[in-house]
Amino acid sequence: MKTLRKLKAVSPVIATLLLIAIAVAAGIILYVFVSGFVQSLTTANPAQAGENLAMTAYDWANTAADLQVTLRNTGPAPLKIVQILINNIDVTNEGGTTWDGVVLNSGQETSNNVDTTGVTGLTVRVGQSYVLQFKTDSGAVFQFTVIAGRRG
């Protein structure tokens, strides 16, 4: 007669230790990947990474008048506004627009006009929303939505 050898499986303790080791190794690999990815995003343009702009108020109640906008630099770095767009139409140097070249230091707030009268390609209608963009000298773009005929 043939004798059969008894084959034993891996003990439950060793199997558990192997699963824990595999999970820890996968976690370390994921951590290295994610931390490298995040670091590449923030070091691509350090000035832009430190910029943050918030619109604290706007007044466009009279659509024939200028859009009055109040902005605050909530980031740690100063920023300089170099271009303003409404619905992708450049209004940086239109009439009474007074934002071009404005520098906001950290925590500073300012209120200025964006002239919307006579801008080619921009028809202002009461109740319609418009996308207002502020571009800085570092290339950052801050986008807000404003509604003609309202205050916010």
Image (cartoon, grey):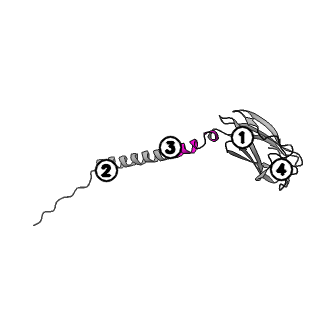
Residue identifier under label 4: 148
Q: Are marks 4 and 1 in contact (CB under 8 Å)?
A: no
The spot of residue 77 in percent (x, y) is 66, 35
Q: What residue is drawn where x is 36% and y is 46%?
A: 21
For the point 21% across and 58% down, the residue is 7
Horizontal side, residue 3 vs residue 69: left or right: left
Callout 2 amino acid: Ala
Q: Amino acid at mark 4?
A: Ala
Instruction: Calculate the distance from the C-alpha at mark 4 to the C-alpha at mark 3.
Output: 43 Å
Q: Earlier in the sequence, mark 1 or mark 3?
A: 3
Q: Could you give the CA–CA distance between mark 2 and mark 4, rounded to whole angstroms?
A: 66 Å
Label 1: state its secondary structure.
strand
Q: Say whether marks 2 and 1 touch (CB < 8 Å).
A: no
Q: Nearer the viewer, residue 104 or 29?
A: 104
Where residue 54 is drawn, which disc sits there?
Answer: 1
Q: Where is residue 26? Give x, y as percent.
A: 41, 49
- At label 3, which amino acid type do we have? Ser
